[in-house]
């Protein structure tokens, strides 16, 4: 599930720098979350950092973007691989056995 920011947002600027996936950005009036980048901090932290830090509790789960923990982890891996120097060339060691 991706998170979303409701119109109760006060634009306090706390959430944006805490997002490890750069999913939070300033929208037309309030901060918004790009659902294709939001992993709810899976792969980075035990809990969503934006939710933990929001002073007005305006960051619920987005009911239109329901994802399982496994899907969130897969999204995390895709995002990491897409970064410059990501998994495709970062020295990540595969634990998969090589074919004989």
Image (tube, helix red, strand yellow):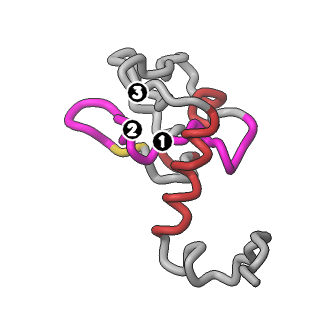
Q: Residue 53 versus residue 1: which sits nearer the camera?
A: 1
Q: Which residue is mark 1?
A: 38
CB of mark 3 within 8 Å of CB of mark 2?
A: yes
> Do the numbered discs 3 and 1 sit on residues whose CB atoms are within 8 Å?
yes
Q: CA distance from mark 1 to mark 2?
A: 5 Å
Q: Residue at x 57, y 36 (%)?
A: 40
Q: Mark 1 and 2 residues: CB-CB less than 8 Å, in contact? A: yes
Indicate whether 71 appears above or below 68.
below
Residue at numbered disc 3: 65
Judge left or right: residue 31 versus residue 97.
left
Q: Which residues are magenta?
A: 26-46
The answer to whether residue 97 is magenta is: no
Tell me if 95 is positioned left or right of 69 in this view. right
Location of residue 46 with respect to 57 vertically, above or below: below
User: Quick one: SS at disc 1?
Assistant: loop
Q: Horizontally, is 86 left or right of 95 in the view?
A: left
- Give how far across and how far down residue 78 sits, in percent: 50, 58
The residue under label 2 is 35
Quarter of the image for residue 80 reads bottom right
Tell me residue 71's x, y (percent).
55, 39
**Residue 39: percent from left, percent from top:** 54, 41
The first of marks 3 and 1 along the sequence is 1
Dominant secondary structure of the magenta stretch? loop
Q: Which residue does the image show at 51% across and 30% down from the upper left?
A: 67
Label 3 crowd bin: few (<14), some (14–19), many (20+), radius 10 Å: few
Across and down, in percent, residue 6 comes to 37, 19
Kind of element beneath mark 2: loop
């Amino acid at each position: 599930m991706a998170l979303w920011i409701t119109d109760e947002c006060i634009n306090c600027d706390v959430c944006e720098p805490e997002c490890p996936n750069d999913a939070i950005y300033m929208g037309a009036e309030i901060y918004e979350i790009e659902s294709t980048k939001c992993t709810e901090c899976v792969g980075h932290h035990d809990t969503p950092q934006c939710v933990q830090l929001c002073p007005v509790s305006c960051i619920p789960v987005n009911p239109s973007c329901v994802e399982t923990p496994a899907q969130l982890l897969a999204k995390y891996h895709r995002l990491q691989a897409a970064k410059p120097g990501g998994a495709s060339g970062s020295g990540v060691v595969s634990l998969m056995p090589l074919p004989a």
